[in-house]
Image (cartoon, rainbow, N blue to C red):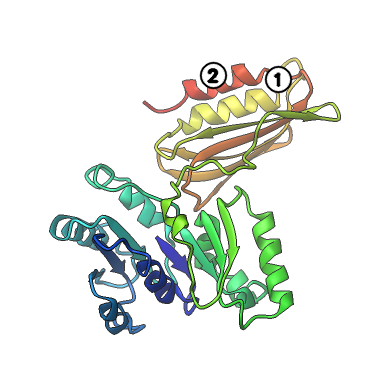
Amino acid sequence: MVTGFLGVGKTTAILDLFGHRPPDGRWAVLVNEFGEVGIDGAVYEHGGLTVAEVPGGCICCSAGLALRQSLVTLLRDVKPDRLLIEPTGLAHPASVIDTLRTPGLKEAVDVRAVVGLVDPRHVRSPRHLDSDPWRDQIRIADVLVANKTDVCSEADLLAFRALAAEAWPEKLVVAETQQGRMDPAWLELGSVDRPADAPLPHSTDGVDHHGYLWPPEAAFDREALQELLQRTVRPEDGRGVLRMKGIFRVRRGWYLVQADPDAIRWSPVGHRRDSRLEVIAQRGDVSFDALGQALDAIRLR
């Protein structure tokens, strides 16, 4: 999936990726802006790329029925080796990932990393900072790419780099480009590839840090998770963790969870790459092996 706000250059990027298609590759693109951005003529210049449209408005609003019907038809009739999805610039793309992972589709597709395009000139714009779809597109991107760097200022690039550096979880790739030029290697990244700087056990200044990572199909019992987090941050013996920060898939969605001795806070999140948890504790206060076993015990089977 290639996401990005209106006018960021998604179509140009898809055409560039198509230029790297193997000679015998059968590629298709599912577009939610068909006819609005002149993709048809440009695509057919290259030949061999099947274009399908999701009718009925925004792809995330259509995800329940129209998106699924279009996907099934495309996969059945075209049988592409690779399918690229271009949601409208106003879409909340997480629902597309959820649809791709439903029974009947998850057996047919291998969901790869989401490529998110950003115009650096928008990073400091109140219009974009206040836009839920724009923020969702940033969060769900596994590969975050600043496009149009040839027309932005150095201050814009610095703002993009700061945005990328603050992103949590970490992006698999952060890149800068212009004219929609893409690296085809990004298409080979799986949605659960572990970044090089993913949380790993280490200790500093008497404090232990530990990280856990689960594939996207893993889901947890929310009530049991709430109880486990509460026992861990507020144990009877007073030897609990200092802070826990995680993203969990539960029965009814995905949530960012932040826990400390004062509170456990849940908020919906667009991230779909994996479930994960980072823990900070005083050295020796927590058995990370025991906590990992307890977390696995409350996974839904």
**Residue that sits furthest to the left in the current view:** 77
Q: Secondary structure at mark 1?
A: loop
Q: Residue at x 48, y 74 (%)?
A: 180
The kind of residue on which mark 1 rests is Val
Count neighbours of disc 1 (C-alpha within 10 A) and say few if under 14, some if 14 to 19, many if 20 or more: some
Residue 263 vs 166, above or below: the answer is above
Q: Which mark is residue 33?
A: none
Q: Quadrant of residue 203?
A: top right
Residue toward you, 115 or 59: 115
Is 194 left, or right, of 241 in this rendering?
left
Count neighbours of disc 2 (C-alpha within 10 A) and say few if under 14, some if 14 to 19, many if 20 or more: few
Q: Which mark is residue 286?
A: 1
Return the residue at label 2.
293
Residue 47 drawn at (x, y percent): 24, 75
- Marked residue nearer the N-terminal end (2 or 1): 1
The kind of residue on which mark 2 rests is Gln
Is 104 left, or right, of 8 in this rendering?
left
Whole-angstrom CA distance, mark 2 to mark 1, is 13 Å
Q: Secondary structure at mark 2?
A: helix
Residue toward you, 232 or 124: 124
Is 73 left, or right, of 121 in this rendering?
left
Q: Is residue 76 visible?
A: yes
Residue 100 vs 40, above or below: the answer is above
